[in-house]
């Protein structure tokens, strides 16, 4: 599996709300970070849209799959994203840094939305594929007034 | 004078009964325009906190109703609120959300203004047949501006209540959360999360102050996760309703006061930072009050019309139209508290709030569905009668009800009618 194929696989799991399979991609030291501003550098002092350690990420997944989050179920079958402009760095200390752009369309009941951004991954090669050591998502609209983000991005 | 945009004029007492509210107040664009005139352009509106502009030249861009303003600390160290509009031909002067500048230069014809508001220079001014009197072209300050413990409020109305009169009894509750800082000072320097929703602005204060009635239904999973993580249980709040929790205050303010409903103490050993923080609070406020502050949630509060305090943050409600609202979540940093405490507060904040939090998105989702429901006008009345029979008058002029009562909403709407009818 190439890094590109891994990103396509991850995108499919997110689109199809296959939460457990997506969570299984993560190393237990992983951090999942969606900053407000692309240049935010210190999540200890700056609020983020998402700043999950592995435990918080598990809670996020538990909540999304609980069936009791209002905004979630109507998104089933109504999300697809395109991953493109993939750039793969060299492997350093067992970690491959990969970046890619995405466009995500969501057809909600009362609103259709487009989300765009760039995802930055630290991936650890493992077996035939990879595990996620870190993922940082830079939304183009993170510092603007955004609608609810109740899905995996 | 308020502009009457509805013909014939509406008596708002006919749209808000003792325990009923008519759907048009959430839906009607004419009523929205009238709210701008009679509420947003009349009363004190929260602008920002002085800690957002700590140094000379620091500014933030804000709104009062639909009117763009900037809050800027001048080189003379004075914080001022100006209309964000060039005195030449009315271009929006400042585009950046925030920043630091010695001067504001208009992007249209490059007229420039000092960060204290004085006009610096018009451009190509030899084309006027007289010397432009610069003092006549300074940035226009918003008519009135006052602050309370760093919270800056402004009013575009030349006359009206003082800020002290407007805040009234709510200052006691502002003090309670600001005093969570061992230095007695808060700072809003951790950034902001911005969320939009397709619903009326009034849903936000109504929903924000009544977590206990809707909590078991829409926040169930978040409460379970919170209990698992912290060892604290919030479900006990629903098992037995407590009197005097839900409060309305004169002036349309609302409070959820949990001081009589202590949280079940965590069974876990507190961290060294928690112990240090507890010692700081007890040293400052004494053993008895300190213990109460640490063992209960500081009361949640709504300062009419646009400021909300909940646990980790100040929230600002910004109307866009009858059917759209922007909301801003500013985490509150407690000056003097150990870094670990403030960092934990940020993580708690993200757990609950913002577009990707585990609690407030369910509220926002309800607000959007509420707006859709409001388009059905067959029976156009909402019912806010819970606890009407048992609410009681309080010494501060407000009323109190039990944990899940709608006493606070009735107080909000009584004040709304007064303002909208021009009687307040």
Image (spheres, rainbow, N blue to C red):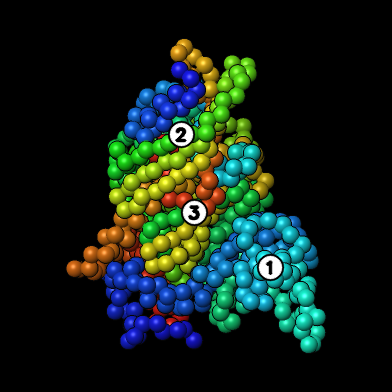
Q: Measured from the top left, where is residue B354 in percent x and y?
A: 47, 47
The quadrant of the image that shows the C terminus of chain A is top left
Point 37% across, 64% down: residue: B323
Question: How far apart are the two marked residues, 3 and 2, measured between alpha carbons?
Answer: 24 Å
- Viewer-closest of B52 and B335: B52
Classify mark 3: helix, strand or loop.
Answer: loop
Compared with residue B116, is residue B130 higher up or lower down, i.e. above or below? Answer: below
Query: How many residues crowd mark 1 within 10 Å: few (<14), some (14–19), many (20+)?
Result: many
Residue A24 seen in this snapshot: yes
Query: How many residues crowd mark 3 within 10 Å: few (<14), some (14–19), many (20+)?
Result: some
Q: Quadrant of residue B160?
A: bottom right
Q: Is residue A91 left or right of residue B135?
A: left
Which residue is denoted by mark 3 in the rendering? A145
Numbered disc in front, either 2 or 1: 2
Q: Are marks 2 and 1 on the same chain?
A: no
Contact, CB < 8 Å: mark 3 with mark 1? no
Q: Measured from the top left, where is residue A109 in percent x and y?
A: 29, 50
Q: Measured from the top left, where is residue A24 in percent x and y?
A: 41, 22
Q: Measured from the top left, where is residue B193 in percent x and y?
A: 52, 50
Instruction: Using the image, tell me which numbered label, if any, was put on residue A83.
Output: 2
Compared with residue A95, is residue B79 higher up or lower down, i.e. above or below? Answer: below
Q: Is residue B166 left or right of residue B128?
A: left
Numbered disc in front, either 3 or 1: 1
Numbered disc in front, either 3 or 2: 2
Classify mark 2: helix, strand or loop.
Answer: strand
Q: Are marks 3 and 2 on the same chain?
A: yes
Residue B215 seen in this snapshot: no
Which residue is denoted by mark 1 in the rendering? B106
Tell me the subunit letter for badge 3. Answer: A
């Amino acid at each position: 599996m190439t890094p590109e194929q891994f990103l396509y696989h991850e995108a499919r799991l997110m689109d199809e709300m296959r939460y457990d399979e997506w969570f299984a991609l993560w190393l237990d030291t992983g951090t999942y970070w969606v900053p407000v501003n692309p240049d935010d550098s210190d999540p200890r002092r700056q609020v983020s849209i998402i700043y999950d350690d592995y435990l918080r990420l598990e809670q996020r997944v538990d909540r999304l799959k609980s069936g009791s989050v209002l905004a979630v179920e109507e998104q089933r079958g109504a999300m697809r994203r395109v991953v493109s402009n993939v750039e793969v760095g060299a492997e350093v200390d067992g970690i491959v840094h990969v970046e890619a752009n995405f466009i995500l369309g969501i057809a909600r009941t009362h609103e259709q939305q487009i989300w765009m951004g760039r995802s930055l991954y630290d991936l650890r090669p493992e077996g035939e594929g990879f595990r996620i050591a870190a993922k940082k998502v830079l939304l183009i609209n993170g510092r603007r007034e955004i609608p609810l983000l109740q899905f995996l991005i | 004078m308020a502009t009457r945009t509805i013909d014939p004029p509406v008596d708002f007492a006919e749209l808000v009964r003792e325990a009923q509210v008519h759907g048009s107040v959430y839906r009607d664009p004419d009523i929205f325009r009238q709210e701008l005139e009679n509420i947003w352009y009349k009363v004190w509106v929260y602008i920002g906190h002085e800690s957002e502009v700590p140094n000379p030249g620091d500014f933030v861009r804000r709104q009062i109703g639909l009117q763009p303003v900037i809050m800027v600390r001048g080189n003379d160290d004075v914080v001022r609120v100006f209309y964000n509009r060039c005195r030449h031909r009315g271009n929006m002067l400042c585009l950046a959300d925030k920043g630091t500048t010695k001067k504001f230069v208009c992007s249209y014809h490059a007229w420039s203004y000092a960060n204290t508001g004085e006009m610096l220079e018009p451009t190509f001014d030899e084309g006027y047949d007289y010397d432009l009197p610069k003092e006549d072209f300074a940035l226009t300050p918003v008519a009135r501006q006052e602050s309370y413990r760093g919270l800056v409020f402004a009013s575009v109305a030349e006359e009206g209540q003082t800020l002290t009169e407007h805040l009234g009894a709510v200052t006691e509750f502002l003090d309670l959360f600001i005093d969570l800082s061992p230095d007695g000072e808060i700072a809003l320097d951790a950034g902001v999360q911005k969320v939009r929703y397709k619903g009326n602005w009034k849903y936000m204060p109504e929903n924000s102050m009544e977590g206990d009635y809707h909590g078991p239904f829409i926040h169930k999973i978040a409460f379970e996760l919170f209990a698992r993580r912290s060892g604290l249980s919030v479900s006990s709040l629903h098992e037995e309703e407590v009197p005097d929790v839900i409060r309305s205050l004169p002036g349309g303010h609302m409070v959820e006061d949990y001081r009589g409903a202590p949280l079940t103490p965590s069974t876990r050993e507190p961290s060294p930072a928690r112990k240090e923080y507890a010692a700081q609070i007890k040293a400052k406020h004494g053993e008895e009050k300190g213990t109460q502050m640490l063992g209960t949630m500081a009361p949640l509060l709504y300062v009419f019309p646009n400021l909300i305090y909940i646990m980790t943050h100040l929230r600002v409600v910004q109307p866009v139209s009858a059917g759209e609202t922007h909301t801003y979540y500013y985490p509150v940093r407690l000056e003097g508290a150990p870094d670990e405490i403030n960092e934990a507060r940020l993580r708690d904040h993200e757990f609950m709030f913002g577009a990707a939090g585990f609690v407030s998105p369910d509220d926002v989702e309800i607000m959007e569905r509420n707006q859709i429901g409001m388009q059905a006008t067959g029976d156009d009345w909402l019912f806010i009668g819970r606890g009407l029979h048992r609410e009681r008058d309080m010494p501060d002029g407000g009323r109190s009800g039990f944990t899940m009562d709608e006493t606070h909403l009735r107080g909000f709407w009584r004040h709304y009618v007064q303002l909208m009818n021009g009687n307040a």
